[in-house]
C-alpha cells in the first residue's frame, strides 16, 4: 500500500482532463493507494470549481472527493496550520500549497501535483 498527498492542482487537472490527469486517475483507481487531502486544499478546489462552473458543480465535486474510499480529508488543526505557516514563511508557494507540504511531511508521503511552485521546496517529494 502506498500513501500520497493530493494537491488541489492534481485534482483540478483530473477534473479538467489536463496533462497528467491520466496518471492521477490511474493512481486514484488503484485501491491499494491511500490519499490524504487537506481540508484547506479541498476548499481551494471548491472555490475554483464554483467560480468556473457554479456552486452546484463545486458541491458535487466536493461530495465526489469525500466519497472516495481511499481519500482521507484531513482537518486543519493548530499543529497543521503552524506547519503550513512555517512553509509559507519561506515564500514561493501559496498558503493552500503550504498545507499540502505540511501534510506530506506529517505523513511521510509524496505530493501529487503539477504545480511548479513545488519544484523549489526542499524535503518534499513531488509526483
Image (cartoon, grey):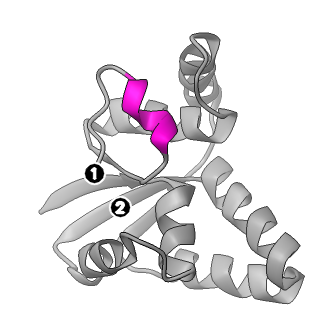
Marks 1 and 2 sit apart, C-alpha to C-alpha, by 13 Å
Q: Is residue 7 magenta?
A: no
Which structural element holds mark 2?
strand
Query: Where residue 43 appears, x then y in whole percent?
Result: 72, 58
Question: Nearest the camera: 117 or 44?
Answer: 117
Q: Magenta stretch: dominant SS?
A: helix
Residue 127 tag number: 1
Mark number displayed over residue 35: 2
Magenta range: 116-121
Please give the name of the residue rendered at 71% of the width and 56% of the height, measured from the top-left corner: 44
Residue 17 shown left or right of residue 126 in the figure: right
- Residue 117 forms part of the magenta stretch: yes
Residue 126 versus residue 24 in the image, above or below:
above
Observer-nearest residue: 92 or 45?
A: 92
Q: Callout 1: helix, strand or loop?
A: loop
Within 10 Å of disc 1 (Cα), the crowding (few <14, some 14-19, many 20+) is some
Amino acid at each position: 500500500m502506498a500513501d500520497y498527498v493530493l494537491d488541489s492542482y492534481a485534482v483540478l487537472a483530473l477534473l479538467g482532463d489536463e496533462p497528467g490527469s491520466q496518471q492521477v486517475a490511474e493512481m486514484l483507481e488503484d485501491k491499494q493507494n491511500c490519499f490524504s487531502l487537506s481540508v484547506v486544499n479541498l476548499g481551494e478546489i471548491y472555490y475554483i470549481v464554483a467560480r468556473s462552473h457554479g456552486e452546484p458543480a463545486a458541491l458535487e465535486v466536493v461530495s465526489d472527493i469525500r466519497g472516495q474510499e481511499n481519500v482521507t480529508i484531513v482537518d486543519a488543526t493548530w499543529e497543521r496550520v503552524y506547519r503550513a505557516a512555517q512553509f509559507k514563511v519561506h515564500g514561493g508557494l501559496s498558503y493552500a500549497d503550504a498545507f499540502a507540504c505540511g501534510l506530506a511531511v506529517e505523513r511521510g508521503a509524496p505530493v501529487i501535483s503539477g504545480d511548479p511552485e513545488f519544484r523549489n521546496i526542499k524535503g518534499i517529494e513531488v509526483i
